[in-house]
Amino acid sequence: MRLDKLLANMGYGTRKEIKKFCKSGAVKVDGKPVKDSSIHVDPDSQEVEIHGEIVQYREFVYLMMNKPQGVVSATEDLVDETVVDLLDPEFYAFEVFPVGRLDKDTEGLLLLTNDGKLAHELLSPKKHVPKKYFAIVNGRVTEEDVEKFGKGVTLDDGYETLPAQLTVLAQGSISEIELVIYEGKYHQVKRMFESVGKKVTFLKRLSMGALQLDEDLELGEYRELTEEELEFLRG
């Protein structure tokens, strides 16, 4: 990999700036100053240093966020704050993006990464990656609803959902439920309940595949995945 590309990817400046750093002697490879920013280096076997700081290179980052309501699952938006806006500047150079979408008024688990291959694996309709949600629903969620969801319901556009696992946690004029679905249609959870005459008033994603939301994360907070969590995701 070119030295200037490596340093630019890690957020140390533009290629033009890095060229100047090299000429000033601020960049070293294996302890020796390097004047030419276009040389190729192997970040796995060579030590790169800039301004006296050893560069810990990595190609991909994986972030778990507890997304708050009112924030858009996008990399940019002309009106609303995005999940990327919540990140520290150290992650800007990685150009991460949300894996899938949570509605603006939905909170909970959101994965952000720049690993397009993993994102594709998790979002592929053929994979049927399970996603678990907690919801508060206006209306009494019944055993009949559980059975209907277990067979799949018909949405407002005629789409037949895959079978889903509905668990009633609290039952009454306002119900609390958990729901596991295996696809990601637009507003799917809300539309599934609308199909049985009920309205979701609060929605939170708890898990995606084997990745569970870290309940220690406050709304708007995030952290990098552990190696164990990453292995779970990769299957």
Image: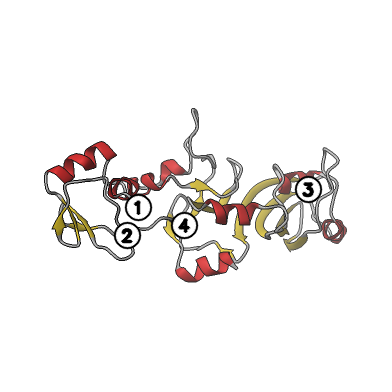
Q: Which residue is mark 1?
A: 1
133 with respect to 161 (left or right): left
Q: CA distance from mark 4 to mark 2?
A: 22 Å
Q: Which residue is mark 3?
A: 192
Q: Which residue is mark 2?
A: 42
Q: Mark 3: few, some, or many residues within 10 Å (few <14, many ≥20)?
A: many
Residue at 46% from the left image edge and 69% from the top image edge: 227
Which badge, 3 or 4, is on the more N-terminal residue? 4
Quadrant location, the C terminus:
bottom right
The kind of residue tagged 2 is Asp
- Secondary structure beneath dot 1 equals loop
Which badge, 4 or 2, is on the more N-terminal residue? 2
Q: Is residue 91 visible?
A: yes
Q: CA distance from mark 1 to mark 2?
A: 6 Å
Residue nearest the observer in this picture, 171 or 1:
1
Which badge, 3 or 2, is on the more N-terminal residue? 2
The answer to whether mark 1 and mark 4 are in CB contact below 8 A is no
Q: CA distance from mark 3 to mark 2?
A: 51 Å
- Secondary structure beneath dot 3 equals helix
Q: CA distance from mark 1 to mark 4?
A: 22 Å
The kind of residue tagged 3 is Met
Q: Which residue is mark 4?
A: 62
Residue nearest the observer in this picture, 172 or 6:
6
The answer to whether mark 1 and mark 2 are in CB contact below 8 A is yes
The answer to whether mark 3 and mark 1 are in CB contact below 8 A is no
The image position of residue 98, as x and y in percent, is 53, 47
Residue at 17% from the left image edge and 46% from the top image edge: 22
The image position of residue 165, as x and y in percent, is 77, 62
The answer to whether 73 is drawn above or below residue 55 in the figure is: above
